[in-house]
Image (cartoon, rainbow, N blue to C red):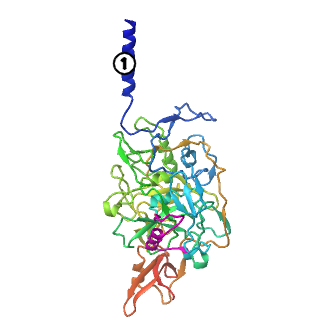
Amino acid sequence: MNTRKLFILIIVFLFVAGCGTSSTPAQPTSLVKPTKTTPPTAAATEKPIATSTSAPLTYPVVDTGQGKCYDNDVEIPCPADGVFFGQDAQYTGLEPGFTANSDGTVSDNNTGLTWQQTPDVNGDGKINAADKLTFTAAGEHCTNLSLAGQDDWRLPDIKTLASLMDFLGTDPSGATVTISVIPFLDSTYFGFAYGDSAAGESTTDVQFASSSTYADSKTAAGLMDFAVNFATGRIEAYNVEKKFYVLCVRGDSAYGANQFSDSGDGTILDQATGLVWQKADSTKGLNWQDALAYCEGLSLAGKDDWRLPDAKSLQSLVDYSRSPATTQSAAIDALFNVTAINNEAGQIDFPYYWTSTSLADFSGKGSEGAYIAFGRALGYLNKTWVDLHGAGALRSEPKSGNPADFPSGGSRQGEAIRILNHARCVRGGNVRLTPEGNPSRTRPPIPINGFIPQPKPTVAAPAGGSPSPEAIAACSSKSVGDPCQFTLPLIGAVNGICKQLISDQITNLVACIASVP
């Protein structure tokens, strides 16, 4: 009789254990945050933090590398809780790691991709304007490249290129003295140089081309290419005739492809990255501090380990095949809910979304936070709001303040300043809590000597007064520094460069100024 009971118990045990297996995608588990050294002012339940699933990731998102914490202006000790808690430095993912090979290539130890080590295209040992190529020429260069015994190189798409971004960098924009700054690309492994002043470039003219063009085919500026600026830590779309630095890549061509599934509980799982996303958004604009608090305080799908995503995590969410004009949607998969807004031009549009990442400037301040435009990335040019940098752009703006103080946009090409941006929270991924940050993390800075010009140069108005209407129209949707062309009666086609004009009668006007042979 006892033997029979024992046999039954064994059968029951095996049945229950077998019921524990499941064919559904693995979900991130949760770990309890470590006890804080400073006790909270009020009793509170410790908030768990998500860790990654054990399933292999096909799109591992590399950490931003940011180790410092900031308030709305300057660097601060990372807060133990409360105000400004939950920013980029306090959540650490896959730490950037590279291997410099002896054949002119660099291997990314996280993504498995192999990169061309330097953008020195002409091989003269210098990185300058002579190495830059147009979008078409950049693609041809990578297709025809034979390096390290391999010939399967390609121009990286924008998500692949963005995997190299390192937000330990400091932005030199606006500096007028000799400074030392850190690029947003690890220059201990990759060749890098700031803008070529001898060729008339600004310090921040350091855009690297991608194979991703802006989906908005209705833009008056023509075809635009998304590029990463490794001097400023930004992603923006530019006219394809502009010249870019180039880094070719080989390896997994599927890197950057999402694998979304709706969990049915208000969350979206991306099996490619291991990240779990809030399906909805905050439904209203928040300043940066409030966006951090919103995600830290979110309880959804039985979890409360939500956080505001860092810049690279949120950029992984962008669908660059979508745009307001082409798909009448935000640049994100249709599974997600996106709050519609009316933009500065009076159009139905979609929000900017805050990230937890600060954009440090050359002085060490962190008064601007990085955001991603899931709708049009507007700028005020020639007294008109235009889609300056495209849906999917990564830019920055003040973390706090009154948007009404910027009726014509900010100092960077008149970019729309909203301050009250939306938030979409995330959990999971290869992330661990690092409440004190890593403020000692650094790289050798690069000295920049002499005057550092503003990213937007100005020139005197042409003799005889205002430029022709044709010259103005040629740059109506272009950026300063872009090539342009217009036609004049009796003269024919005129080629030039878009420049900002200043005189006693002209302010904030961009027009096509003929190139001097």
Residue 253 in which image quadrant: bottom left
Number of marks drawn: 1
Q: Residue 517, how many percent across, how many down? A: 51, 89
- From the viewer's perspective, is 365 left or right of 222? right
Q: Which residue is mark 1?
A: 11
Residue 447 within the segment the image draws in magenta: no
Are there few (<14), some (14-19), or many (20+) residues within 10 Å of tag 1? Answer: few
Residue at the (51%, 67%) spot, across then down: 208
Q: Can residue 274 be seen at all in this image of the molecule?
A: yes
- From the viewer's perspective, is 347 left or right of 148? left
Seen in the picture, residue 180 relative to 109 is either above or below; the reply is below
Q: Secondary structure at mark 1?
A: helix
- From the viewer's perspective, is 4 left or right of 87? left
Q: Look at the image and tell me in which quarter the N terminus lies.
A: top left
* Range of magenta residues: 131-154
Residue at the (35%, 45%) spot, across then down: 261
Q: Looking at this rendering, what residue extends furthest in the bottom direction?
A: 490
Q: Amino acid at mark 1?
A: Ile
Residue 194 or residue 310, whichever sits in front: 194
Q: Residue 300, how many percent across, how many down? A: 41, 38
Q: Residue 145, how many percent across, how many down? A: 49, 69
Residue 236 or residue 99, whichever sits in front: 99
Seen in the picture, residue 365 relative to 514 is either above or below; the reply is above
Q: Can residue 406 be seen at all in this image of the molecule?
A: no
Residue at the (35%, 55%) spot, across then down: 340
Seen in the picture, residue 230 relative to 499 is either above or below; the reply is above
